[in-house]
Image (spheres, rainbow, N blue to C red):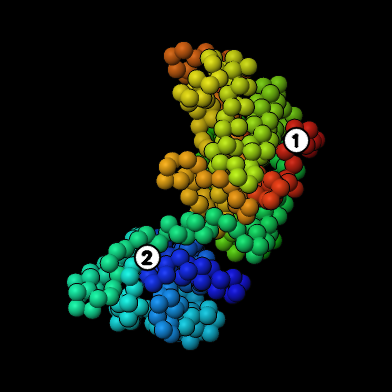
Amino acid sequence: MTTSYTHRRQRVMDLIGSGTAIFASAPPVVMHNDVDYPFRQDSNFYYLTGFNEPGAVAVLAPHHDEHKFVLFVRPKDPEKETWSGYRAGVEKAKEQFGADEVYPIAELDEHLPKYLEKADRLYYHFGHDRALNNKVMHHWQRLLATYYKRGTGPVAIEDATLMMQTLRRLKSPEELDLLRRAIAIAAKAHNHALEITRPGRFEYEIQAEMEHIFRLEGSMGPAYTSIVASGVNACILHYVENNCQMQDGDLLLIDAGCAYDYYNADITRTFPVGGRFSDEQRILYELVLEAQLRAIDAVKPGAPFNQFHDAATRTITEGLVGLGLLAGNIDTLIEEKKHKAFFMHGTGHFLGLDVHDAGILRNPDKTWKPFEVGNVVTVEPGIYISPTYEPIEGQPQIDDRWRGIGIRIEDDVLVTETGCEVLTAAVPKALEDMERSR
């Protein structure tokens, strides 16, 4: 992957020209007292460096004669490493990560100005690290104040994340390999969950067995907090308590994925705990599946990003009207967003280093950007009928037999030259597969 990081940095330097870009690592996050959460590197920083430690800053200065890629890192410290883990240190960071120069992070103020003074623009994202924000602003203001003496220096600051949104939108072959590995592991876990789910078991048991597979197969663990929602819990989009006992007659909605070298799978399946759908569950499941298949058909090069959501929305709205759960003209219902009573989220998002990955969706004129070969997107329509649903004026009352049903089906889809590839095809979703005997 070293060559990949070099290539990515060069793409950034080509974009910034005579500018200087600064990227910061993620900070450690405290869980309680002196115990940290597991460290998770900033995605942009990792994308450009592969360096997986906190307390670091990367500087890209293509205009500098010698040092175009500079790292500031924590130095070796045997005492601190005894408590919190080994550090690469200055020498190994230079050797392993391809930097032209590496300094201790404590020397940032001393050395940063020489990588800024000849830049015409500064690229930096003002994030949560206020101390670093203040340092960057201090150096920029000082150079700006003396610009009239030197005739050089950054006269403007641009958010560095905007160009990263463009670069990370397209996945390289190396990135796709990592995504495929994460998806293969998550698929194995989902298929195992389908086999072991039975009435009387608890949601957390299914979560535990899936996450056991995540780690056993070499992933970093869950890509996000696993959703294992049975019965009415499936009507809560981000249900994460996972503490209820599953009952015969319930559906189980599982939205879970794992991370492999920071690249993420994101899969949702819904199936009957007892092995058979009720009539109402079957009807709604087939409607969601139809909406998802139509949405997947709309994922192809050149198609505007909103098209797959529009396809899913129209299919679901037509189906709900046909079932008497909504009433009115289809176009009017969609325009007035009446379908959101039952389908309240988008149909998908980009997927990669972040679960909701980088990628600008609209052009400056508000038109939607088209899909390109190399995009990876989730396709995840759903229907959720809350047990407490009350129709707004003009909409019909609904029979209790529909209440408490929540269904979502989600696949990870790669845009190819000829259309798209469903990367999560190893996880079944046909109705007859969801009803296999257990």
The residue furthest front is 151
Quadrant for the N terminus, please.
bottom right
Residue at the spot 68% in from the left edge and 51% down from the top edge: 416
Residue at the spot 48% in from the left edge and 80% down from the top edge: 99
Q: Amino acid at mark 2?
A: Tyr
Where is residue 306? Give x, y as percent.
54, 38
Front residue (pair 203, 219): 219
Q: Amino acid at mark 1?
A: Ala
The disc at residue 256 is none
Where is residue 140? Give x, y as percent.
26, 70
The disc at residue 123 is 2
Residue at the spot 60% in from the left edge and 74% down from the top edge: 3
Where is residue 413? Give x, y as percent.
65, 47
Q: Secondary structure at mark 2?
A: strand
Q: Residues within 10 Å of mark 1 (few under 14, many from 20)?
A: few
Tell whether 411 sits left or right of 152.
right
- Residue named by callout 1: 430
Asked if 380 appears above or below 352 in the picture, the reply is above
Asked if 404 appears above or below 222 in the picture, the reply is above
Asked if 310 appears above or below 170 in the picture, the reply is above
Let me know if residue 34 appears in the view: no
| Quarter occupied by residue 64 | bottom left
Q: How many marks?
A: 2
Single out the mark in the foreground, 2 or 1.
Answer: 2
Front residue (pair 138, 89): 138
Where is residue 147? Give x, y as percent.
22, 74
Tell whether 184 sits left or right of 354.
right
Residue at the spot 47% in from the left edge and 60% down from the top edge: 164
